[in-house]
Amino acid sequence: LYGDKWQYWKQELLDFGFSLQDPIQDLLIVESWED
């Protein structure tokens, strides 16, 4: 669907140090703080 754009953004995210697990952990922590 996204083709080359997805490949580009995925590489950008990987280069930035993005992982699939860490952002989810961070979101859960932030939500717990709001309570």
Image (cartoon, rainbow, N blue to C red):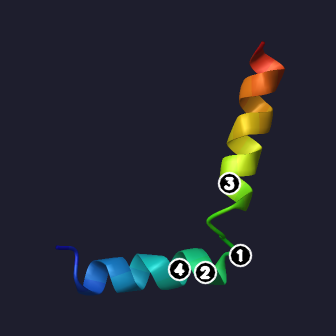
* Residue matched to label 3: 23
For the point 51% across and 85% down, which residue is it?
A: 11
| CB under 8 Å between discs 3 and 1 | no
Assess whether mark 2 and mark 4 are in contact (beta carbons under 8 angstroms): yes
What residue is drawn where x is 71% and y is 75%? 17
Mark nearer the viewer, 4 or 2: 2
Crowd class of label 3 (few under 14; some 14 to 19; many from 20; radius 10 Å) = few
**Which label was assigned to residue 12?**
4
Decide which of 21, 18 is in the foreground and name it: 21
Give the foreground label among 3 and 4. 3
* Residue at mark 4 to residue at mark 1: CA–CA distance: 9 Å
Quadrant including the C terminus: top right
Residue at which label 2 appears: 14
Give the crowd class for mark 2: few <14, some 14-19, many >=20 residues within 10 Å: few
The quarter in which the N terminus is drawn is bottom left
Left or right: 23 as drawn, with respect to 35: left
Q: Amino acid at mark 3?
A: Pro
Q: Nearer the viewer, residue 9 or 26?
A: 26
Q: Is residue 18 above or below residue 10?
A: above
Going from the N terminus, do you reach mark 3 or mark 4 first?
Answer: 4
Residue under the point 22% across and 83% down:
3
Q: Which residue is mark 1?
A: 17
| SS at badge 1 | loop
35 up-or-down from 28: above or below: above
Alpha-carbon span between mark 3 and mark 2: 13 Å
Label 3 to label 4: alpha-carbon separation: 15 Å
Q: Earlier in the sequence, mark 3 or mark 1?
A: 1
Q: Which residue type does callout 4 highlight?
A: Glu
Q: Earlier in the sequence, mark 4 or mark 1?
A: 4
CB-based contact (under 8 Å), mark 2 and mark 1 = yes
Residue 25 relative to residue 11: left or right? right
Q: Are marks 4 and 1 in contact (CB under 8 Å)?
A: no
